[in-house]
Image (cartoon, grey):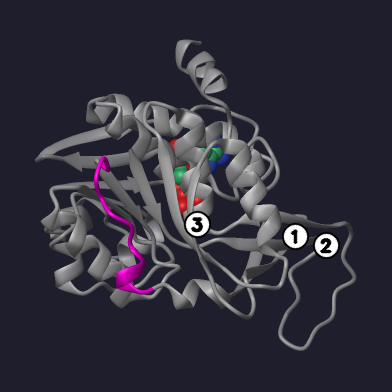
Amino acid sequence: AVLVAGSANLDFVVRAAHVPAPGETVLGYDFATYPGGKGANQAVACAHAGGAPTRLLAAFGDDGHGAAIEASLRDAGVRLHALRVRGATGTAFICVSDAGENAITVAPGANAALRPEHLPALEGVSHLLLQLETPLPTVTAWARAARAAGVQVVLNAAPAQRLPAELLAAVDVLVVNEGELAVLTGVDGDVDAALDRLDVPNVIVTLGARGCCARLNGRRWRQDAFAVVAVDTTAAGDTFCGTLAAALAAGEDGAAALRRASAASALACTRAGAQTSVPSRAEVDALLAA
Ligand code: ADP
């Protein structure tokens, strides 16, 4: 099984002509809520990808906002290990402009309550998939526990931040976008040089519509993006990570896993929302065969 441990948020999304500047009020258009959070999004993508059962450790508040996220996880077939706390569920306030730019404020809420001891038993788990929307000391402890148990650790180092060496030392597969890579390594604008800086056996850098590149066990790979008409790139990275973990857990080799993750994330760009935009395995198979 793949165990995802991470955030669950309810996304409050409003579209507007432009993203407001500080002090400005913008009259927007339609409003919608979507189940989100990097951990929950990646779990849904992993479950849709098939190949291995998916479990998620996530935290929920008692404000009722968790219900939609839990329903989405249930529909996807994710087995949930829920920590329930008092107070707010994680919430993201997202403004998307006509130009497709966004501004996002996340209130971590219950996600901040996740601690090392909440990690469930790792029996039957081959891969642990982590992100950085939960407290860094917790993520570090989870990665080290998994490494000690012989579980492969996949870390999506998002949102961007510097990482302690003890966390990186426990990571088998690191997935970052260009901005995250620059913050992590201090090398800006030179992906190849930045890749070489990282002392992790497998590193994948996603490049948006330009696809991705990787260093897998010392070998360089490039994967072009699949051509689609993108309408909302929210959760493209999450779909990539969840699909990648599922493919690796199913025993696919690195190149095949990159291809499948690229196809799934391209399809996710063609639909609105986070978890609502994750394609089915059949859709991904069809794109891969096209
Ligand atoms: P993030 O959303 O985390 O910033 P990226 O923007 O790099 O991540 O996107 C992750 C992956 O999603 C890319 O590697 C690519 O495979 C796919 N992707 C993103 N944008 C597009 C696009 N416009 N067309 C096709 N695929 C895309």
Residue 261 located left or right of residue 80: left
Q: Which residue is mark 1?
A: 97
124 falls in the magenta region: yes
Residue at 53%, 49% in the rendered image: 41
Residue type, label 1: Ser
6 falls in the magenta region: no
Q: Residues within 10 Å of mark 2 (few under 14, many from 20)?
A: some
Q: Nearer the viewer, mark 3 or mark 1?
A: 3
**Residue 169: assigned label:** none
Residue at 80%, 83% in the rendered image: 24
Give the vertical position of 16 relative to 26 (above or below): above
In the picture, residue 240 is in which quadrant?
Answer: top left
In the picture, residue 261 is in which quadrant?
Answer: top left
**Closest to the observer, 93 or 139:** 139
Q: Are marks 3 and 1 in contact (CB under 8 Å)?
A: no
Residue at 68%, 38% in the rendered image: 271
Q: Which residues are magenta?
A: 115-125
Give percent across and percent down for residue 281: 51, 23
Residue 165 located left or right of residue 94: left
Q: Which residue is mark 2?
A: 17
Q: Which residue is mark 3?
A: 38
Q: CA distance from mark 2 to mark 3?
A: 26 Å
Residue type, label 3: Lys
Give percent across and percent down for residue 284: 51, 22
**Mark 1 falls on what kind of element?**
strand
